[in-house]
Amino acid sequence: MKKTFYLLTVTFLLLSCNLASKPEQNSLLVRNIDELNNFINKAAPGDVIVLANGIWKDVQIEFYGNGSKNKPITLKAETPGKVFIEGTSFIHLGGNHLIVEGLYFRNGYSPSTSIIRFKIGDNKTAFNSRVTSCVIKNFTKPNRLTNDKWIEFYGKHNTLNHCYISGKSNDGETLRVFQDGNEHSSNHHQIVNNYFGPRPRKGGPRAETIRIGDSKTSMSSGFVNVSNNYFEACNGEVEIISDKTNYNTFKNNIFYKSEGSLVLRHGSFTTVDSNIFIGGDDSNFYGGIRVVSSGHWITNNYFYKIKGEEFRSPLAIMNGIPMSPLNRYKQVTDIVVAYNTWVDCKSPWQIGVGQNIKSMNVLPKYEIRSAPPIRSLIANNLIFNHESDDEPFVNHDNFEGILFKNNVLDNSDKTFTKYGVFENNTIKMKQINGWLYAPEFPQPILTKSIYFGYEFDKIKTDLFGTSRSQNSIGSISNFDTAEKFVINNNLYGPDWFSSEQRTTSPKIFKTSANGNELIQNIAEANSGDIIELTDNLYAIDNSIAIKKDITIRSKNNAQIIFNNPQETPLFEMHPYSFLHLDSVILKGKNNQLAFKPLDKKMSAAYNIDVKNSTIEGFGYILKAPKGSFTDILKFENSLIKQCNNGIVLAAEEKGDYNAEMVTITNCKFESVSNNVVNFFRGGYDESTIGGILSINNSTFINCGKFEENGVLLKTKGIINVDLTNNTFQNNPVKYVAVLWGAKNNIHKENILINSGEIKVEEQQKLEILY
């Protein structure tokens, strides 16, 4: 008996010691890439490889191993957020049951096609693996035209969760799911609880935040789950998410002030349920859901102040192309849009979007979208407007293939009876927070005439997960639950990282003309600071590099005279820079440039805002090289005179362009010989804003005398052009402008004196990009 007790005691002690030492035994701290590669090669199921805190620079990690469901192999930071991956670096995964956790990618870019990739090389694919609690911030290619994807999904049953992804400014999707072959289709990937954004405007196509599949794999199944994510300022292009395979789910996501849409592009049988789209009055490009193809169920979604038009409409149901090629637009069939709510949205329902029969003479047959939606149902939806909307329903073609049932419209003081698709009524709505309005109950109009369509019994809950046993039209069926809802930021991204930036008051540098004080103060200033010129005259011999958000202003219209004899810019714009000029006079020579971005390595946009200033005597006001992009370019209350060339934004091709928002207000252009404004966008592409040029209340005198093509303001291919209340006098050109009538090009109340005419071409023939 004693012997037996002794053996049991020894066995228990051995087991206890083994269990106690197990975490320590399996945890492997590494301090450099050689140690890391060594431990990866030796890793066994259950091992935890720990990267020591600090900067890991120029590390290309190939994490291959085979763990098990209960004993994954983990690669993690010693302290989450304290392991910084910098330089030319990436981590690619291959094998089974791997976990990557707690890494922070910054100050660099991937030398490969991706930063995080669930595949090593051509044949080492990852399965059942997870990347969690990681940050990728501004880890973007030096050249914005170089394509990559930050995250590439391959294999099956892989997960990205609780990650923060922001700042991609170069060509290519932020996240891409590949489905090439059986090894990668029907993959059941999970993209959940992440924070995406901001993604800045790219000025060209291929800038989605998430893309699932492509046209070549659009016949395959995905079963990808994109749920509980937060998308903020995802402005890369018109498609925030581009769904191009079948049976995917988008649920409980929040889209906050993002200038694009959730687009059901090539895929079919998609579930879009309980998502929230929050817009505002500050942009007309916030989008909702755009529908192509077949079999989608769009239910329980909430839209607030979504004001995009056509492709960015709150609900855009597209026309298709008869017998469409795989990469174009399939006809919409057999979709259900039910139990959704739109509050203060502009023209929330648009049917037959993209119908372009009038373009038959300039587009090939395979681009003509003439097939309207058919065999579809829109039922039990609610539209509520505090101010009346003249067109809550826009019909671009033929909507007879859609059945409309029990859709209620409260259009403030204006009924809308055209087309007979709404029941006009008054709804009591209560504001819960800045964007959420919920109907008060009971209201018979919301509960009595609910339409029960085929398989509507499967719609069991509302926007906030409340049972629909006490059912109501719209996305909210229970006021009490809605009243308690708040956005929980802890659900999105890593718990150790905050995207909130501390705001500080700007420092004002009183700057004299002595020595290099101006250059030194600009270099010393932080973003947001102000350089205040206190003298009257500043002589500058070399270019001033602008690498931050900086204001240069004066109270006495100080002059900055640029004396460099070379063809160089006075202000050299770098990535992420924003230059504000106020009440300053810039003087140059005929071979110089007032502003110019770098010729290479413009990884991100620059911005310029000029007001109350004079620019005189330069060869160019602004000349944008290929690969550069300005998001905001503004001239206000300023004089531009005696320059060889004006604003030249014309270096790109095939859908890309050099600027997004160009605004000229209350300005005077005098004796600008050539390229007064040359804003160009090449190629037929509908995936972007397409450039905005607004010229208002400005005067152009004696400009364009050396203009070879006879056009003063060149806007070829730009989608949005507004010429209003301008005066053109004694400009020796044939045309002030040649506008694109089929797009958003308008002119009104302009005065033309000895300056040719404004011509409108309804259709323009451009190169097809696809």
Image (tube, rainbow, N blue to C red):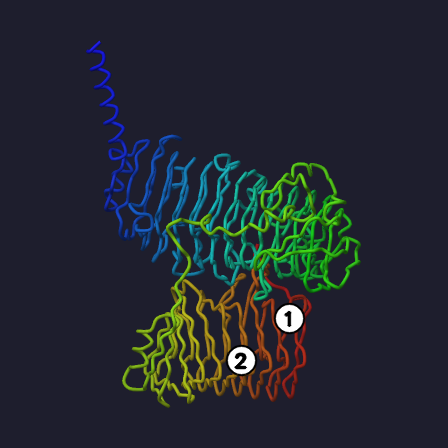
Q: Residues within 10 Å of mark 2 (few under 14, many from 20)?
A: many
Q: Quadrant of residue 694?
A: bottom right
Q: Nearer the viewer, residue 182 or 332?
A: 332
Q: Where residue 387 is drawn, which disc sits there?
A: none
- Residue occupying the point 57% across, 85% down: 700
- Report the quarter where the N terminus lies: top left
The residue beneath circle 2 is 676
The residue beneath circle 1 is 745
Q: Is residue 349 above or below residue 759?
A: above
- Residue occupying the point 44% across, 44% down: 161
Instruction: Please tell me which of labels 1 and 2 falls first in the chain.
Output: 2
Q: Nearer the viewer, residue 410 or 83?
A: 410
Where residue 169 appears, as percent x and y from the top left, is 45, 59
Determine whether label 1 and label 2 are within 8 Å by CB.
no
Q: Is residue 712 above or below residue 120?
A: below
Q: Quadrant of residue 383?
A: bottom right
Q: Secondary structure at mark 2?
A: strand
Where residue 175 appears, as percent x and y from the top left, is 47, 49
Q: Give the amino acid type for the residue marked by disc 2 in the picture.
A: Val
Q: Is residue 154 above or below residue 561?
A: above
Residue 300 shown left or right of residue 167 in the figure: right
Q: Nearer the viewer, residue 662 or 601?
A: 662
Q: Give the amino acid type for the residue marked by disc 1 in the picture.
A: Asn
Q: Residues within 10 Å of mark 1 (few under 14, many from 20)?
A: many
Camera-side mark, 1 or 2: 1
Where residue 574 appears, as percent x and y from the top left, is 39, 69
